[in-house]
Structures are given as C-alpha cells and as structure tokens.
Amino acid sequence: MVEQSDRAPLLDWEEVPPAELPPSVPSPESEDSLQSGVSSLLSWGCVGAELSSNTSPVRPNKVTAVLGESARSPYKQSGPGGDASATDEEGDCALHGLSVRDRRINGWEEKDQIVAVFVVTFDTRSGNMIEWCLPQDVNLEGVEFKSMASGSHRISSDFIYFRKGCYFGLACFANMPVESELERGARMKSVGILSPSYTLLYRHMHFLENQVRHQLQCPGQYSPLEAFYEDKKAVLPPGGNGLITACPTNSIGPIVNRCMHPEMKITHPAGCMSQFIRFFGEQIMVLWKFALLRKRILIFSPPPVGVVCYRVYCCCCLANVSIPGMGVLVPELRPFFYVNVADIAALETELSYVACTTEKIFEEKKELYDVYIDNQNVKTHRESLQPLLRLNNADRAKYRKLCEQRQLLLYSQEVDGDCTSNEEDLFILFFMEQNNRIFQTLSEVAGSADPTLTAEHVRAMGLDPHSDRSFLVDLLEVYGIDVMLVIDNPCCPAVLGS
C-alpha cells in the first residue's frame, strides 16, 4: 500500500464525536457578523444539489439540500455514520470548511479514486511522449502536452492541474541536468494522475513530487506507481462519465450550488485565495464582475504554471451564489485549469470557462475568450465589456471593506488567538454574500407588483447606479431576470430580462 500524501496546510480540523455536533448554526444576520460567522459556514458546495431556503430581504438565513438520484453515487457513503475505513484521514475534507464530523453526520464521503497514472518524458527527437501508464488501454491522448507545459524547459520543477475530457488531472514536472549529449544536458519528466474529481487531487501532490524525482534518477522503475494505482484505482459506475454531480450537506449555513471547489495544497503561507486577491488588488472587483457574468476568462503566464492554476480556481470562487435556483439556466463557470493549443477545439464549444496557459499564441485567437489576463493586466476585446474594466467608487468601497475585514481577522488571530476562522473562508464568504445580495434584490423586484429597478435598489445591492449600468444590463440578460431598469431616464425606462 502506498502511503497517503501530506495533508494540505489549511486542513486542520479537530475531530469531535457526532453527538457533539449542534443541530444547526444560523448564518450571519448582517454584514458585520461576517467575521464571526465564517468558520461556521460552508465556503463552497456541490454540483447540482436541489436547494430550499427561508430568505431574508438580503440573503438566505438557512439553506438545506435535497438530494436527487445522483446522490446514490458510489462516491458517497450510504449510512449516516459512513464507513469507518473511509474516514481515516482525520481532517482531509473534500469541502473547505466542512469538517470530518460534519461529513460523518451527513453520511457523505468522497472516495479517493484514480482513473489512470502515467509518466511523460521529453524526447529530444520526438518531443513530449507518454513513457508509461496504467491501465494500458486508457485514452491519454494529449496528456503529454497538458502535463508538461510549454516553456517548462526553463524551470526546474512545477505542478499542473488540467482537464482531460470528463476527468481532471494533476501532474508534477521536474527538470534535472544530466551529462548526456543524447539528452542535450537535461532530463525532463512529469508524473501525473487522472481522477473523476479534482477535489482530492491535492492529497497526492507530495507522492507525485517524489515520484518524478525518482523517475529522473532511476528511469524505468515503475513499481511504486503500480502499487499506487492498485491501491487507488477507481471502479466507475457502468455507463457513467465518472463525474460527481451532487453531494449532501446540512443546514449549518449557505452552500454554493453547481460548483464544487477543492481544498488544494497551497504554496503560499496565507493561502491561495489570499495571495490571489493581494496579487490583483482592486482589479479583483473587475474579475468578480466578469466571473458573475459567466464570461470566458483566459489567464496567460509564463511557467511555472502551478500558481496560475490556483488563480483559475480562485476566479471560479468569485461567482459563488447560494440562493436556491439562481443561475440554474446560465452556463456553468467551468475550471479548465491549464490549456494549450491541443485544447483549442474544446474551448471553441465552451460558453463559459476559466483557464490558464503558457502559450502566447492564444492572445491572437480572440474568438476563444472574452477576457484576457496577462500578469495583472485585465483586458477585453469586446466593446460591450469595455466599461466593466473601469473601477468605480462602489468597487473601491467594496475592496476597502474586504481589506478591513481581513485586517480585523488578522488582528483577532494575533490578539485573541482565534484559530477558528481563516482568510480563505472570509474571502469566499465575502463574495458569496455580495452575490446573494444582488440576486436577492433582483428576485424580489422581479416578483413584486411593480418590477421596477430604481437607483435605490442598485445602491442597496452595493453597486453604482450609473457606472454599473452596463454590468446590470448584462447581468439581467444572462440570468433572464425580468425587471424594468429606471436610472438614466425615468421617462423612458428600459425593459430588461428574458
């Protein structure tokens, strides 16, 4: 049996017997309660869960999930206590903010299963090629380019998240100098895996890092990888595509429907979401609007690409909404992680995605994306989206509030020793509550006797009535919300929505 990899730094949940779990924890009643409530709320949730809630004028007070047929997937435990053997990784939670005790109460445990394991090498004559894999009949076409990013020859190591059809992959790359004319002085390999879900890929980061170094030093010795595959290989449901489509939750707070996000092993001490926001600064508010509008977002960066894969993940988190039924008919904001020229055909069919690349040629292929990010420069070639690039006073006010809440959290951690909350929870919940406020207000106006959206409504949503008009127009159109927008000219209102 192959040992489990190291736990991710943020996964430090204390095991509590099920009897000690309170029946429910109410969500915050106001914005000021955000800091105290973050540790008791789910930062993200599940794909395709049916939801019901009692809502306040601003946001849901309580959200519960009702499972459909997909809940009977072999990736979940059937009983309320779960399988004891399946929860021996104390604290290795698939959902950030959801502890082992919560998962046991709800009888949900995602099994850690691998579809394939492979070794990719760079050959000076043939280029990238698959050197070895298990099972031998698995379709790995294109994986040799996904797991060894273009330009990687300039760096010594990297890790890459990617998609391969309905599966997700993680590969660790390493470049070792060698005294060999045949290899032109360098030996480069990647060792990777495919899984039905990217939720638990981080668990194997350490193992893959060790194995790629082993393959560089001792080429052709695959026995540890064979043992790993035999230990972790998936038994997928017949006729299914292997994707996890739903997972249960309890009523300890709002959940995010339609998008399950992983807790990844991170390379930044403060966390990938914290680093993401510090990297972009106020521009995070621009990305937030594009994510909420379900635009196609492509991030360019030279290698290493691992940290850029985290930016893909963080962009998706900006669009979290926990209001039942909201956004069900809009395109799902799908994380593609790393892409290269071999993915062009797949991207041409996508209505909404976030991806990253190291290939500059993508910038010229404007039909593939709506928003292009180069380092900290966010731009769009679409004239209708140009107004969204300009920050307004409401955007700056939200960003200041986010920074203030972060400072309060850091102060409480330093002075009071509060270890129950972290920056990841705070950032995720901040944008979720902002999104909930917008859609709650829009839903109430659309369902009222006078479905007129006024400047007062817009201000209540935390938006600028004039500068955010184009954003609102796009938002109403994308989500099919029928309201009458009266801001610029009360005499000639514009009817918006489906």
Image: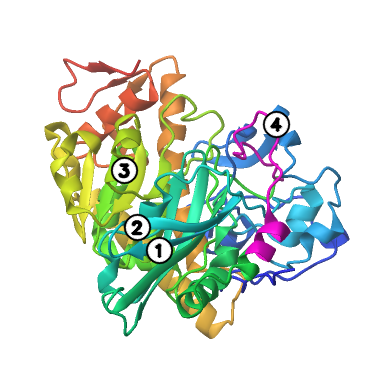
Label 3 secondary element = helix
**Of residues 160 and 248, which is closer to you in this image?**
160
Q: Amino acid at mark 1?
A: Thr
Residue designated by label 2: 128
The residue where tag 4 is placed is 238
State the residue at coordinates (60%, 65%).
203
The quarter in which the C terminus is drawn is top left
Q: Which residue type does callout 3 highlight? A: Ala
Which three-letter amino acid code belongs to the residue tagged 4? Pro
Instruction: Select label 1 or label 3 by which is in front.
Output: 1
Secondary structure mostly seen in magenta is loop
What segment carries the magenta color? Answer: 226-250
Q: Is the residue 296 above or below the residue 445 in the image?
A: below
Give the residue at x 73% y 51%.
Answer: 109
In the rendered view, tell whether residue 432 sits above or below residue 448. below
Q: Earlier in the sequence, mark 1 or mark 2?
A: 1
Give the percent coordinates (x, y) of residue 96. 59, 58
User: Residue 234 colored magenta?
Assistant: yes
Which label was assigned to residue 342? 3
Horizontal and vertical percent position of residue 430: 44, 54
Q: Residue furthest front?
A: 182
Instruction: Name the residue beneath numbered marker 1.
Output: 121
Instruction: Tell me the quarter of the picture where residue 352 sits.
Output: top left
